[in-house]
Each structure stands twice: as C-alpha cells, then as structure tokens.
Image (cartoon, rainbow, N blue to C red):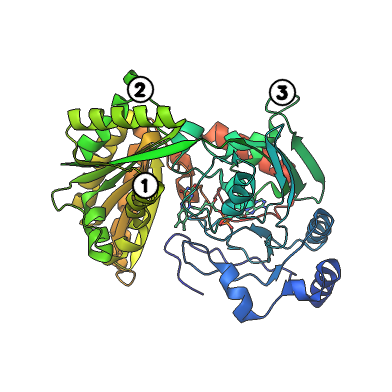
Amino acid sequence: MFESIHFESKGRRTTTASNPDVLAALREIVGDENVVVDPARVEPYGADAVKEKFPPEAVVFPSTTAEMVAILKLANVHLFPVTARGGGVGYTGGAVPVDGGIVIGTDRMNKIIEINVDDLYVVCQPGLTTFDVQTAVAEKGLMFAPDPASYKDSFIGGNIAENAGGMRTPKYGVTKHHVLGLEVVTATGDVIRTGGKTVKNVVGFDLTGLMCGSEGMLGIITEATLKLLPMPEATSTVRANFHSMEAACKVLTKFTPEGLLPMAMEVIDKYCVAAIEENFAFGLSKEAGAILLVGVDGSKEEVERNAVTIERIINENGGFDVIRARSKEEEDKLWDVRRAISPSLMKYGTLKINEDVVVPRSKVPELVARVEEIGKRHDTFVANFGHAGDGNIHVNFVVDRDDPAAIRRARECVAETFQLSVNLGGTISGEHGIGYVKSQYMHYAIDRPTLEIMKGIKRVFDPKGILNPGKMFI
Ligand SMILES: Cc1cc2nc3c(=O)[nH]c(=O)nc-3n(C[C@H](O)[C@H](O)[C@H](O)COP(=O)(O)OP(=O)(O)OC[C@H]3O[C@@H](n4cnc5c(N)ncnc54)[C@H](O)[C@@H]3O)c2cc1C
C-alpha cells in the first residue's frame, strides 16, 4: 500500500465486493465487460489528482439509473463500500476508495438528454465533461458558466459533487448557482428528484443545494438539469505586472466603486512567475513581483469600455507593463500563463501540497503576506496563485516527496494556513472540498453542533455507511 501523507489508514474494511456471488450479481446488472477486476486496469481508479493509491476491489460502469439502483441495493445487502467517480481529477481524494469496495465509473452515463433554448436549461447525464456540455450548448448560442480549470477532464457529476468553482466565479458564482434540478440514487437505492427546470422553485427543503458539494456521500447523481445563459457577445482580458502580491491584490477592490464586476480576477506570485518563465519562456518580466489577470465579458461596446477602465485603474494603482488583448488569440495567450502554473511549480520539489483556502477578498493581501511568513518560519517553500477576485487562493507548499521532515513541516504550514483563513473570516476550502485529505481539519471551520447536523444528514441518506466512507468526517 502506498504511504499516504494525508491519511492514516485504520485498515480497509473487510468487504464482500470481491465475493464471487457479488461479482456475479454486478456482472448480471451491468454486463460482464462493465465490471473490471484486473488489478492493472483497476489501479488508476484508486487515485485522483492527490496521486495517492487506494485501489478498489472492482470498478463498475453502469449506463442507466436502473442499473445504479440495482448496484446500490446490492451494496445494501452485502454491505460493501461504493465510491462514485467522475473524471478522477479531484484534489482531495474524494473519488478514491480509502475503505475499499467498488468504484462506480460514470463514464458511460454521458448523454445530453435535452437542450432547451427557450427555457434556458440543459438536461444531461453526469459522465459528460464540463467541456462537452459547454461545447454542446455553445452551438445553440448558450453558455454553461461554471468553468473549473479542469473542465476538459472533470465530469458534470464530479463538478456538482464538489461544487466546483472556476475563473468566472466573481461574476457567475460556483456550480451550485447553475444547477436547477437533479436525479439522485441514494445510498439505499431509492431514486429522488430534487428541484426542477425552473430558476424559481421553493417547494420543500433545498435538496439540490444539499447535493451540491456533498462529495458523493449522500447519493449518486444520475441526471442533472443545468441553468444556461446567453453566450456573451465579447470578452477581453487585461494583464499587468505589479511589484508585489500585496499591490496586485489591493487593486481587487478598486473596480466596484467604478461600477465594474469583472468576470475573472486572477493573481500569480513571483515564485510562480519565475517557474513559468523557466518552463515556458513566455517573456515575462523579471521585475514582476506578481501578475494580475482581469477578464471581462458582455456586449462589444461594454467590453471595450470596461477593459479601458480596468487598464486605467491598474495603471493608477501601481500596475506596469499593462497589456490588453485585442483578439481571441491574444486573449488565449494571456491566459496561457495562468494555465502554465501547476506543472511549472514542480521545479521547486517533487510533492506539491495544493490548498485552496478562501477569505473575504479584501483580506487576500493579508492572507498572502502571512502565508509567506508561515512558510519562512517552517523553512518550507510556498507559492501562491489563484482566484483572488473571489478570495480563493491556491497556497502551494512544495517539498521533496522522500523527505519526511520536510513533509511534516509542510503539514504544520497547512494547519496554520487553515487556522489563519478561518481567523480572517474565510474557510479551509473554496472549491476542492474535503475528501479524506482535509477531514482532520473540518473542525477548524465547522463547529460541533453544525458538524453533528451534517453527520445526521449523512445517516438519513446513508444509514449503513455505504457511500464513500472515510471522507469528510473523522
Ligand atoms: C489541473 C487541475 C485544475 C483544477 N481546477 C479546478 C478549478 O478551477 N476549480 C475547481 O473547483 N476545481 C478544480 N480542480 C479540482 C477538480 O477538478 C474538481 O473538484 C472537479 O469538480 C472534480 O471533478 P471530477 O469529475 O474529476 O470528480 P472526481 O474527482 O471523480 O470526484 C470528486 C467527488 O465527486 C464525487 N462524484 C463524482 N461523480 C459523482 C456523481 N455522479 N454523483 C455523486 N458524486 C459524484 C466523487 O465521489 C468524489 O467525492 C482542478 C483539478 C486539477 C487536477
């Protein structure tokens, strides 16, 4: 077993998922070819972007809601853990079966059922990537707004279960703001329908909202009705250098008094800039203590006017080398720098602990300054970048994977950063969720009575503890 830096295994649950009768029943439900037990083929389903391995006993690929119901009913009889998986690019081990059992691959549930232009919604299965959905609705002149950077790999089911955010969050919000209704198979094998096809719907408790961010612990999403918007006519991006992260982050609050709500506001610190330049040679300035990227969308006139105002505000507030994209190609080039960060950071070590803390955006300068101080105090390299416009910063502690003392220091840094974020009025995760990686820190952000309510909700949906055990609560 791979040694996890995030998880002390209490031993995998003895399950019956590898019991020949159970495997025969699973094959009966989904067909022989859709139950995979070969260790080499199963192994990739034991890891996500955290890159720690907990292989399942089997991977099962249903294609209908009826098959999903039958699998969960079987699990309730034989009491084996079931973990749903989307694209498998989560950052908190959510799709990883730490307690054993089966993984349900949703890859075959990949159909668009309806795109309704008049009523502005799309009905789809959970196994489509975000990119698939965006592309299908774009052909009708519509936009599905949530845009996690993983949009080409992550699935709609995973996005909903993690309540994913993205670059466009400052203007458009996160995934839950774009989910109108869901079909869900609960842990007991019941099918429930939440919400509907309308933007307004206040009948009963908001179970759609509850499912968003439920990390595959309450039910498996088998169908989603997603809200669509008209595709904006134009977009533009302004990129600028600043002498420090503090200076770049201080600009974030200067747009609102001018009546502006940029679609995206991203910051990149000097360590990221140096790593990107070394890897990709974009020609970034050595003087750049930080880079700020600001994106706007709307009508052509509005975009032009707003981009000019943004340039002016940036120039008035310490920005230099300000560039404004004049075409889609130029815009893509400016964003290429942002996309290059994650792979480039591996220059600093073999293990990148990527956190996604969030604070009220006016507190971002203080967060970043104090995180640097935490890194220095624990002799740990730290680089910061992220969605500063909504206060969600990716704090990356980078160490060597084979240096246990360095890993221990990095974990101290993580704990202090989480406490700091809560103290600044924020919380420990803005978009990646908890999974098994952050379960030990839940109590930093959630008080005991609230945590007990959450555990109670879990018991109502999943009395036998079948769905995704070992996550969120310890
Ligand atoms: C390079 C990179 C960039 C990223 N950028 C962003 C970003 O900008 N914003 C952001 O929010 N995240 C980002 N992430 C994190 C990740 O991509 C998101 O959390 C994404 O939503 C996960 O989707 P997935 O399909 O890969 O889910 P998985 O990792 O497969 O699963 C995640 C969770 O969802 C559950 N789940 C999956 N499918 C279902 C279903 N049908 N029903 C119920 N539960 C289900 C799983 O059990 C698990 O708990 C990034 C990750 C990487 C590697």
Q: In this rendering, would 373 be left or right of 125? A: left
- Quadrant for residue 97, please give it: bottom right
Q: Which mark is residue 256?
A: 2
Q: Which mark is residue 106?
A: none
Number of residues whose C-alpha sits closer than 10 Å to that of mark 2, classed few (under 14), some (14–19) or many (20 or more):
few
Q: Nearer the viewer, residue 341 or 99?
A: 341
Confirm whether residue 265 shows in the render: no
Picture coordinates of residue 299, whole percent (x, y):
47, 30
Q: Nearer the viewer, mark 3 or mark 1?
A: 1
Which residue is the site of mark 1? Answer: 331
Amino acid at circle 3: Val
Which residue is the site of mark 3? Answer: 202
Which residue is located at x 33 percent, y 49 percent? 334
* CA–CA distance in space, label 2 to label 3: 31 Å
- Quadrant for residue 278, please give it: bottom left
Sequence-first disc among 2 and 1:
2
Sequence-first disc among 3 and 1:
3
Q: Nearer the viewer, mark 2 or mark 3?
A: 2
